[in-house]
Image (cartoon, helix red, strand yellow):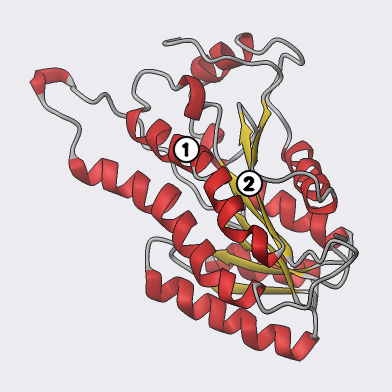
Amino acid sequence: MKPENRTFIISGGASGLALATARELHSAGAYVSLLDLNAESGSQITSELGPRSKFFETDVSSTGSIAAAIAGTVSWVRETGAEVGGVVAGAGVGLPGLILGKGNEPLPIESIDFVLNINLRGTLDLIRQSLPLMATVKPDGPDGERGVIIMIASSAAFDGQMGQVAYAASKGAVASLTLPLARDLSKYGIRAVTIAPALFESNMTKMMSGKVKLGLEKAMEFPKRAGQPEEFAKLVRTTVENSMLNGTVLRLDGAMRMPARL
C-alpha cells in the first residue's frame, strides 16, 4: 500500500513521534488527519503542511471527543476523495510512580486510570471508531488491502523499570492485543502492527533529568544514543508499504534492555 492520496488518522499528531510520522507520510503524498489536545501546535502544523492536513482538537480519553474527530475526518475525506489508509495511535503519557510508595501508601488509582485511559483505552477507542470507515474503503492491489492500524507500545512493555507499573501495563496490553486485532480484521484486508520504541527524543524524554537520560543511553548497545523521531517515522512508512507486516510487534530499541533501576 502506498501512502499517496490516502488519509491517515494520527492521534498525538501535534508532537513527538506522531508528528514525525505525520510529516513522513505527508512527504510521501498522504493526507494527514491530526488529533491532539494542543490546538496551538495543531494550527501551526497544518499551516506548515498545507491543504493535505487537517487538525482536530481531541481528547483520546473521551469517546465523544474521538467521535467528533472521526466525523470531521469523514467530512474531510468526502471533500478530498482521499480514502482512509490507516490509523496511527500515537497519543500517550507516562506518569511514574511506585505501586507502594513512601509512607506505605499505594499508588493512587487516579494515576493508574490516567495512564490506562490514554495509552490503552484511548488507543482501542480510536481504533474501534475508525474501523467502520476503513472497512468500507475500496480494496486495493492484488491482495485487496484496505489499510493498516499502527499502534505504539514501548520497550517498557517487556522490561519495564521500577515505577512503571501503570505505564508498562498499558504498553504491554497494546503489544498483546496486536495479534488478535490482526485476526479480527483479516477478513477486511486491514492489518495491525505495533512498534515498541525504547529511548527516543520526545516530549516525554524532555521531562527526564540529565542523569536519568544518560543512564538509559548507557543501557543502549548500539547506537548509544536516543533514537530520533525521524527514525521512528521511517519504520511507520515501511510498515504502511510492506503488506507482509501484520500481527506483530516491532522493537525499535538499539538492542536496549532496560535495567530494573538506574
Of the two numbered discs 2 and 1 in the rendering, the one whose residue sits closer to the viewer:
1
Quadrant location of residue 198? top right
Label 2 vs label 1: CA separation? 17 Å
Sequence-wise, the earlier of marks 2 and 1 is: 2
216, above or below 106, in the image: above
- Contact between marks 2 and 1 (CB within 8 A): the answer is no
Q: Position of residue 121 (x, y in %)?
A: 39, 55
Q: Quadrant of the C terminus?
A: top left
Count every numbered label the image shows and give the total: 2
Q: 10 Å neighbourhood of mark 1: few (<14), some, or many (≥20)?
A: many
Q: Is residue 259 left or right of residue 1?
A: left
Residue at 78 percent across and 37 percent down: it is: 231
Q: Helix, strand, or loop for circle 1?
A: helix
Q: Quadrant of the N terminus?
A: bottom right
Mark number, residue 89: none
Q: Position of residue 117 (x, y in %)?
A: 35, 53
Q: Which residue is mark 2?
A: 16
Name the amino acid, label 1.
Lys
Q: Helix, strand, or loop for circle 2?
A: helix
171, above or below 76, in the image: above
Q: Position of residue 119 (x, y in %)?
A: 44, 48
Residue at 75 percent across and 90 percent down: it is: 79
Q: Toward the viewer: 69 or 81?
A: 81
Q: Position of residue 55 (x, y in %)?
A: 62, 73
Name the amino acid, label 2.
Gly
Residue at 61 percent across and 39 percent down: it is: 202
Q: Which residue is mark 1?
A: 171
Q: Toward the viewer: 150 or 35?
A: 150
Q: Is residue 74 left or right of residue 111?
A: right
| Direction front: furthest residue | 187
Q: Is residue 100 left or right of residue 127?
A: left
